[in-house]
Amino acid sequence: MAKQENLPAQAGNQLMEKIISLCKRRGFVFPGSEIYGGLANSWDYGPLGVELKNNIKNLWWKRFVQQRDDMVGIDAALIMNTKVWENSGHLENFSDPLVDCKKCHHRFREDQLENAKKCPDCKGELTESKQFNLMLKTFLGPVEDKENTVYFRPETAQAIFIDFKNVLGTSRKKLPFGIAQIGKAFRNEITPGNFIFRTREFEQMEIEYFIKEEIWKEAFEEWRKEMWSWMTDELGLNKDNIHELDVPDGERAHYSKKTIDFEFDFPFGKKELYGLAYRTNFDLKNHFQEPPYEDIETKEKIYPHVIEPSLGVDRSVLAVLCNSYKEEDNRVFLKLNPKLAPYKVAVSALKKNDEKLVAKAEEIYHNLKKEFSADFDNRGNAGKFYGSQDEIGTPYCIMVDFQTLEDNTVTVRDRDTTKQERVKAEELLSFLQNKI
Ligand code: ATP
């Protein structure tokens, strides 16, 4: 993809509008609560969006949990004992600097104003900044008082720390090892926006990788490489559109001694996609009075240190969509890594009312569906069939025509090259398995 970094704002806005419109039209992402006028910055994943999102999550889980010997997973509750947030420092420190416009009363994150001294909306005077806590509050039980106040987790990480001893006791892992989790997190963001980039409810894929302090630099470097490989090899993001930002002192989260933000050139600008942080042993120390890990050889009790790759699922979906959206030769297509595509293959019959053709196409479709997510698209119009599947990123389209009835071959069309080749119907499964 062409570098997007220098896209003028107007071109970037137009591109975003096209992507948002495609998402809505084709069932990737809808505005949340739409029939009631919507709810600001809430989005629902539709039938194709949930496939894309699940494919990303499953690929991540497979790569970082199932295929490694040094990793296990958990799936913890969204609401935890409030002491978790007292001891983790979130109740005190998890905040963004907020300024108000004295004239139009719009609110801004001070760190996003880029030194602007006036309101970007009406040029009014801004208030002094104050810290605004991002934790989303609710009550458990019928009484809405301080004792029953609880918080939705603002990151998945804390559950991993507080379950550390339970995981250790049941999984027989030795340092270095990691615990992974995929799940929702909630933040009462001051300025949500840019479609699914910044919302108040989102999903994260996080790993806490536990190590001995002395190897933190090597471990950090290993995870930095892993993140690059994830972004480029698995998600297929163009490496020229990814940038590392070494977050300077004073700007890192309260728990971090080193953080690299991986920024991506979204159409609306260069913005954080993922973070990689060295959290030291800050969290385990805050949660456990006694060191929770005993070294097998030395019998020494220690608080392991932690490297944390933290990935937003929704930002992954958005980066993948922006990266794969193509307009070339009068067609629009999503050049998705086939592993991520909602449908791997779609099947159609050349004539929609020809019983024999349709029966054959259905037979092929049902066979393929046992192995791949597949679509049956029987509109009897090759051009529309291909155009429609291109737009949702289906890598292969199969057309059943009259020759099929004679020699049992079909045409397979490649999304990216638009080239067609004839393949024997009985070899389709292995043909696609090789390609995908
Ligand atoms: P930002 O600076 O954009 O607010 P952050 O540095 O606070 O992000 P982290 O706390 O490092 O974000 O969260 C880890 C990851 O979770 C981010 O890199 C991003 O992918 C995702 N994420 C964080 N906040 C949101 C949000 N409001 N909406 C969607 N994804 C988010």
Image (cartoon, rainbow, N blue to C red):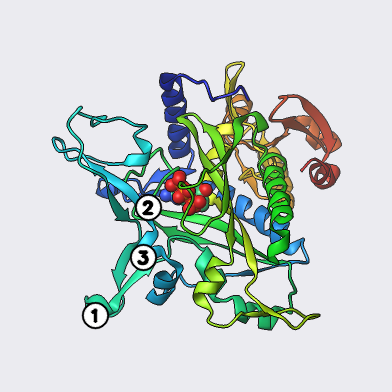
Label 3 CB, ligand 1: below 8 Å?
A: no
Element marked by disc 1:
loop
Q: Are marks 3 and 1 in contact (CB under 8 Å)?
A: no
Locate residue 121: give its quadrant: top left
Q: Is mark 2 within 8 Å of ligand 1?
A: yes
- When asked about the image quadrant of residue 309, the answer is bottom right
Above or below 219: residue 213 = below
Report how far apart the C-alphas of labels 3 and 1 lie in the structure: 23 Å
Provide the residue designation for mark 1.
142
Percent of width and height locating residue 380:
60, 31
**Quick one: SS at disc 3?**
helix
Q: Nearer the viewer, residue 72 or 381?
A: 72
Q: How many marks?
A: 3
C-alpha span from label 2 to label 1: 25 Å
| Disc number placed over residue 200 in the picture, else none | 2
Q: Residue 219, image x and y in percent?
A: 72, 56
Is 75 situated left or right of 118 in this image?
right
Whether the residues at callouts 2 and 1 have beta carbons within 8 Å, the answer is no
| Residue bearing mark 3 | 91
Amino acid on which the number 1 mark rests in the picture:
Pro
- 61 w.r.t. 130: above or below: below
Q: Is residue 77 left or right of residue 343?
A: left
Identified at 43% across, 60% down, the residue is 154
What amino acid is labelled 2 in the image? Answer: Arg
Whether residue 208 is visible to the viewer of this picture, yes or no, is no
Quarter holding the C terminus is top right
Instruction: Report the mark closest to the observer, 2 or 3.
Output: 3
Which of 261/4 is in front?
261
Label 2 Cα neighbours within 10 Å, binned few <14 / some 14-19 / many ≥20: many
